């Protein structure tokens, strides 16, 4: 007892996951975890099951019920055919200073002219393109290669004064980045209510105005100069007509989250909508396309 009674113990929950399942696994763990999701990405990924998503939670009376709920949710995910997802492993992290150490270990990420930093780190006011986002929030903390590919696409898009639609906004990172690059009107949609809440919070935190709704491209009216869609291949394929309908004449569609394996089907779906590939980038087996009508 004594001093040790006040000691907080943490559980580390680790799930090996295929590249395509990483975002979905992160989202599930973020519902149960404290405020940290760490994704270990392999240096040279070929899209295999060599990622590990880790979450941390306080070892209290509810912890094992939460782990069991997470296991069930992961089982459901697997049933949807996303994956493969490995066995969830739990270990105790016996370090009272772990949270502070973890926070200190999160360093700002510089990508495509943006500086993405956690809300607790101060990067100074001189950074025009700083974006404050906490790891462990719903999808999109700037570290995923597909998010980086989208942010890098901003360099070749005209965003100043543009109308932008972000389909599958997650944390809102791309929509916030578009606002920082001078986009005039930004609509962001996500089918996940948790992501909608997160995107709204993050927009307020970053002092940008976004119009965030629950839904998808089919639920939005009008056309946009830039449509962003960092989803997965099969979803891009399925909603290709809805995405096409939102792109204005002279506008662009940025489609990302496509594995090399899924690419032919996605290309065929876009070609059927008369969308032409203007640029293609590939990183760690992830393909990003920029298309125009
Ligand atoms: N835009 C962020 C997040 C991408 S993760 C980034 O670039 O980092 C993909 C997001 O798409 C998730 O938040 C998921 O909930 C959402 N999503 C999945 N299917 C969707 C669909 N059919 N329409 C809209 N959003 C969808």
Image (tube, rainbow, N blue to C red):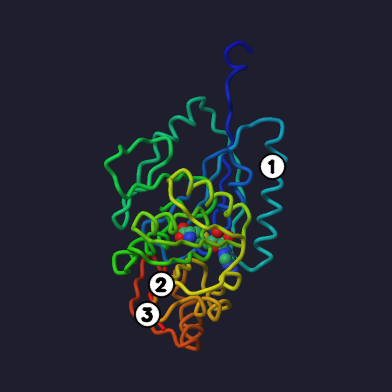
Please identify the quadrant where the C terminus is shown: bottom left
Q: Compute the Cα span from label 2 to label 1.
A: 43 Å
Label 2 beta carbon within 8 A of ligand 1: no
Q: Are marks 2 and 3 in contact (CB under 8 Å)?
A: yes
Q: Residue placed at 59% from the left, 59% from the top?
A: 213
Q: Dividing the picture into quarters, in which one does residue 183 lie?
A: bottom left
On the image, the x and y values in percent for residue 272 come to 50, 89
**Mark 2 or 3, nearer chain start:** 2
**Mark 2 or 1, nearer chain start:** 1
Label 1 beta carbon within 8 A of ligand 1: no
On the image, the x and y values in percent for residue 85 come to 59, 59
Q: Could you tell me which secondary element the residue under label 2 belongs to?
A: strand
Task: Tell me: 195 left or right of 135.
Answer: right
Q: How many marks?
A: 3
Q: Residue placed at 43% from the left, 39% from the top?
A: 119
Give the class, few, some or many, for how many residues have Cα within 10 Å of label 1's Cα (few <14, many ≥20): some
Q: Could you tell me which secondary element the residue under label 3 belongs to?
A: strand
Can residue 24 be seen here? The reply is yes
Q: Which residue is mark 1?
A: 66
On the image, the x and y values in percent for residue 16 come to 54, 54
Viewer-nearest of labels 1 and 3? 3
Could you say which disc has been placed on residue 250 in the image? 3
Q: Residue placed at 53% from the left, 50% from the top?
A: 200
Q: Compute the Cα span from label 1 to label 3.
A: 49 Å
Viewer-nearest of labels 2 and 1? 2
**Mark 1 or 3, nearer chain start:** 1
Q: Could you tell me which secondary element the residue under label 1 belongs to?
A: helix
Task: Tell me: 211 left or right of 275.
Answer: right
Q: Dividing the picture into quarters, in which one does residue 146 lie?
A: bottom left
Could you say which disc has been placed on residue 236 in the image? none
Q: Which residue is mark 2?
A: 225
């Amino acid at each position: 007892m004594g001093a040790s009674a006040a000691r907080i113990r943490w559980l580390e929950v680790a799930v090996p996951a295929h590249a395509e399942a990483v975002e979905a696994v992160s989202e599930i763990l973020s519902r149960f975890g404290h405020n940290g999701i760490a994704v270990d990405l392999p240096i040279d990924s070929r899209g295999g099951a060599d990622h590990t998503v880790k979450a941390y939670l306080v070892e209290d009376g509810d912890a094992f019920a939460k782990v069991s709920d997470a296991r069930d949710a992961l089982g459901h995910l697997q049933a949807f055919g996303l994956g493969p997802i490995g066995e969830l492993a739990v270990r105790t992290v016996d370090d009272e200073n772990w949270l502070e150490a973890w926070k200190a270990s999160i360093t700002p990420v510089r990508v495509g002219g943006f500086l993405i930093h956690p809300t607790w780190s101060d990067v100074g006011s001189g950074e025009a393109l700083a974006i404050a986002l906490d790891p462990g929030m719903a999808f999109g903390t700037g570290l995923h290669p597909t998010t980086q590919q989208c942010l890098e696409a901003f360099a070749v898009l005209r965003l100043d004064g543009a109308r932008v639609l972000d389909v599958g906004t997650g944390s809102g990172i791309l929509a916030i980045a578009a606002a920082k690059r001078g986009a005039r009107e930004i609509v962001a949609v996500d089918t996940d209510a948790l992501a909608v809440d997160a995107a709204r919070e993050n927009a307020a935190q970053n002092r940008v105005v976004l119009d965030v709704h629950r839904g998808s491209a089919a639920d939005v009216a009008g056309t946009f100069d830039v449509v962003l869609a960092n989803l997965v291949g099969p979803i891009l394929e399925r909603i290709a007509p809805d995405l096409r309908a939102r792109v204005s004449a002279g506008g662009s569609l940025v489609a990302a989250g496509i594995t090399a394996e899924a690419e032919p089907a996605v290309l065929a779906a876009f070609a059927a909508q008369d969308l032409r590939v203007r640029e293609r980038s590939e990183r760690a087996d992830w393909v990003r396309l920029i298309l125009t009508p």
